[in-house]
């Protein structure tokens, strides 16, 4: 295959190219990055885009040791600011803004049995994490706890001191806002069960079951269920109350149901004896959870360890995926930031189907089956990821992106709408817009076409034209189509307030992407119509303030108005989680038109520079993360893009736990860093093009799929000061650079 080179004059510094066999790429990944500063990542074990993740759970407050899930916007099972370990949670989300899942907590203890969640935790020390592995030591018990994972299963290893050891399986607590579970004993070493989850971002209808299959490799001396219930007074009973609320069942072994239930295994252990636990999961059934476990792990045998084999497989999977991009030069810090960001970008979307192909149908109770060789994906946080993460998948992991697009189209077939923020077969309606349009249009226009584009196009036209009363994607489309904008007071999605301008801006970019797709498919009239709709953002421009400004139903501007209101995430009329400055330049499809409104190139550049000079830019807020690249639309101003991107990488992306600028948003902030450090960025979602900047590395080598890249199997970017301006996707993957 041909080797595509983007090579212009550059003095390469001596460096070592990171290749497997010399030094491992996974050694540069630091899973603790983003575990503070509300980054909401976690250091747990997971495979690339895996269904299963197994994560240390320390959601109990470190100061009070009180169940505190909803305090301080706590939407993660783990924070590096805490050290109070209460078990491993299973199926966890990375970089999200609302609490969810984090289920089936498994906790090892030593000594007398105690099943009270508030009492059995321990300080965790000597934490170690790398792709596919996490380990720590529990001070209270002298136990070493370790975890690894396959795509749909986990394996945990607990090394005990001499004496009584216990493994607790807690089906009551977790990160979800839902409650209710059942458990069934299968044998002395095996249990199965279901835990209800959902209500993500407090949508009461976004509810789903998760099924579990669990086994250990040591026959316990005792075992049984527990259930939390009010203390019985004046009644003789043969159970240990454990603070008066936990009933432990020692002579009952069939099944149990309730809100706060669990199962315990107890056994005598020798000093240093390891006990392993396997867990399979499914969103369809316990039978499928067992099938996943049998398919992805060898059956546990007494005294036989499976742990190291699974860990090695997990590390190899990550090495292969991360190795699709190899870098040379740059600092060790830059490599750690880069590969940790790429790692985080490969966690979601997540595989949803079981090994037999079954998955829960979207928004109904049925079960579907994915075609052989394909995967059904879930966790589509599209308001975030449509801006850059899916563009990264299209370029570097096209076979995965193709399955993601097919999943989105199948969601439409099953439910009647494309996803907005889909989670395990339920639509949560989080944030706004019509974000599937730019994702699929971008994928199609970049040459990935093995999916049903006509069905996708029909779905897009439906959401772009259906009246408000029946439109789940655009609930305020009537005034948008009639007036060209969404006025205040027409629709308020949630407690965040009236986000009219934010809604309309998302519709404009979606309509622009739809116009590009329509033109490519030969629908010229549609292309013209949607292109015209995309330009009506101009209604919101206020010359007095030089920003976008909310409009009333009669077309007058909101009074009074402060363009900085909302910069601290307080609710503000018209804008969602931001101020007017965070949204004013979010017209990536018509940058030159916006500049004309503002008085021309000089006025535009000066105003955009003001955003950075006066601290009006938010590196963790999606609408303005592409701002640094807008300077490059104007010849002679590209240096500003290079300078500001470099400064942002230095300031906000570090190797510390707070090394992501706020919520990672299922990999969106990390994808920003990946692209920026490689030297190009997809600043206009849906458009098959990039803006160039100076890469952080002397050489970047990206493995390409020749089927989608004009026969080329490598893209090599070599650092040069001449990397500026814009380039099409086709030219990028073909090596046709504008300065050559």
Image (cartoon, helix red, strand yellow):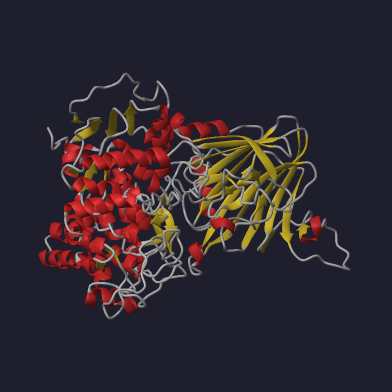
The total of numbered circles placed on residues is 0
Question: In the rendered image, which quarter is residue 134 located in?
Answer: top right
> Residue 252 location, x and y as percent?
76, 57
Up the image or down, 293 lies above or below 548; here it is above
Which quadrant, please, contains the N terminus?
top left
Question: In the rendered image, which quarter is residue 236 located in?
Answer: bottom right
Residue drawn at x 33%, y 34% as measured from the top left: 324
Question: In the rendered image, which quarter is residue 69 located in?
Answer: bottom right
Query: In this rendering, would 316 be left or right of 441?
Result: right
Up the image or down, 515 lies above or below 48; here it is below
Nearer-the-camera pick, 635 or 130? 635
Up the image or down, 449 lies above or below 724; here it is below
> Residue 661 location, x and y as percent?
44, 46
Nearer-the-camera pick, 694 or 61? 694
Q: Is residue 363 visible?
A: yes
> Residue 393 location, x and y as percent?
32, 45
Up the image or down, 198 lies above or below 644; here it is below
Nearer-the-camera pick, 387 or 502? 502
Nearer-the-camera pick, 737 or 316? 737
Query: In this rendering, would 518 be left or right of 248?
Result: left
Residue drawn at x 33%, y 29% as measured from the top left: 327
Q: Is residue 684 visible?
A: no
The furthest residue to the bottom: 554
Which quadrant, please, contains the C terminus?
top left
Residue drawn at x 72%, y 35% as measured from the top left: 142
The furthest residue to the top: 14
> Residue 730 location, x and y as percent?
17, 43
């Amino acid at each position: 295959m041909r080797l595509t080179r983007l090579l212009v004059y550059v003095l390469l510094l001596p460096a070592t190219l990171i290749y497997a066999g010399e030094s491992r790429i996974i050694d540069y990944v630091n899973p603790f990055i983003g575990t503070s500063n509300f980054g909401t990542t976690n250091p747990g074990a997971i495979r690339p885009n895996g269904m299963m993740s197994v994560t240390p759970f320390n959601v109990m407050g470190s100061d009070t040791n009180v169940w505190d899930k909803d305090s301080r916007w706590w939407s993660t099972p783990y924070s590096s600011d805490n050290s109070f370990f209460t078990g491993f949670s299973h199926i966890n989300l990375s970089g999200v803004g609302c609490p969810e899942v984090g289920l089936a907590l498994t906790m090892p203890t030593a000594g007398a049995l105690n099943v009270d969640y508030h009492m059995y935790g321990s300080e965790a020390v000597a934490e170690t994490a790398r792709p596919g592995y996490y380990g720590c030591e529990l001070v209270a018990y002298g136990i070493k706890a370790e975890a690894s994972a396959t795509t749909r299963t986990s394996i945990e290893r607990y090394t005990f001191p001499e004496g009584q050891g216990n493994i607790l399986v807690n089906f009551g607590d977790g990160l979800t806002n839902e409650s209710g579970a059942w458990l069934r004993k299968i044998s002395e070493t095996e249990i199965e069960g279901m835990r209800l989850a959902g209500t993500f971002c407090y949508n009461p209808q976004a509810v789903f079951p998760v099924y579990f299959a669990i086994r250990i490799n040591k026959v316990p001396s005792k075992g049984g269920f527990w259930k939390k219930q009010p203390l019985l007074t004046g009644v003789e009973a043969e159970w240990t109350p454990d603070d008066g609320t936990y009933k432990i069942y020692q002579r009952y072994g069939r099944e149990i149901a309730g809100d706060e239930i669990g199962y315990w295994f107890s056994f005598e252990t020798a000093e240093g004896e390891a006990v392993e636990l396997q867990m399979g999961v499914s969103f369809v059934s316990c039978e499928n959870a067992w099938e996943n476990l049998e398919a992805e792990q060898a059956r546990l045998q007494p005294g036989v360890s499976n742990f190291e084999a699974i860990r090695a497989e997990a590390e190899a999977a990550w090495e292969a995926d991360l190795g699709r991009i190899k870098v040379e030069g740059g600092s060790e810090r830059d490599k750690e930031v880069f590969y940790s960001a790429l790692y985080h970008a490969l966690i979601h979307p997540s595989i949803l189907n079981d090994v037999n192909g079954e998955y829960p149908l979207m928004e109904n109770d049925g079960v579907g089956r994915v075609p052989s060789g394909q995967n059904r994906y879930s966790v589509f946080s599209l308001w975030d990821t449509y801006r850059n993460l899916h563009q990264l998948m299209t370029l570097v992991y096209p076979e995965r992106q193709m399955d993601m697009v097919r999943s989105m189209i199948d969601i439409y077939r099953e439910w009647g709408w494309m996803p907005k923020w889909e989670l395990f077969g339920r639509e949560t309606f989080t944030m706004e817009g019509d974000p599937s349009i730019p994702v699929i249009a971008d994928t199609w226009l970049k040459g990935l076409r093995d999916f049903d584009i006509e069905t996708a196009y029909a779905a897009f036209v439906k959401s772009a034209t259906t009246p408000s009363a029946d439109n789940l994607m655009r609930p305020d489309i009537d005034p948008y189509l009639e007036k060209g904008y969404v006025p205040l007071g027409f629709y308020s999605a949630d407690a965040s307030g009236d986000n009219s301008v934010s809604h309309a801006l998302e519709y404009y970019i979606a309509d622009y992407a739809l116009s590009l797709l329509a033109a490519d498919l030969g629908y010229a009239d549609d292309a013209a119509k949607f292109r015209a709709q995309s330009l009506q953002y101009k209604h919101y421009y206020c010359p007095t303030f030089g920003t976008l400004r909310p409009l009333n139903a009669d077309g007058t501007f909101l009074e009074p108005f402060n363009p900085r209101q909302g910069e601290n995430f307080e609710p503000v009329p018209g804008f969602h989680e931001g101020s007017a400055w965070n949204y004013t330049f979010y017209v990536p499809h018509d940058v030159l038109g916006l500049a004309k409104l503002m008085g021309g190139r000089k006025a535009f550049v000066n105003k955009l520079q003001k955003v950075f000079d006066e601290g009006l830019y938010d590196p963790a807020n999606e609408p303005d993360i592409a701002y640094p690249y807008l300077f490059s639309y104007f010849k002679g101003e590209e240096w500003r893009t290079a300078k500001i991107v470099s400064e942002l990488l230095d300031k906000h992306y570090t190797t510390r736990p707070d090394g992501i600028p706020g919520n990672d948003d299922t990999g969106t902030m990390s994808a920003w860093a990946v692209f920026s450090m490689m030297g190009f960025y997809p600043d206009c979602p849906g458009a098959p093009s990039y803006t160039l900047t100076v890469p952080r590395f002397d050489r970047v080598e990206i493995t390409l799929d020749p089927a989608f890249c004009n026969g080329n199997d490598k893209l090599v970017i070599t650092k040069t000061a001449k990397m500026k301006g814009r380039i099409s996707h086709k030219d990028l993957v073909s090596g046709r650079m504008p300065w050559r």
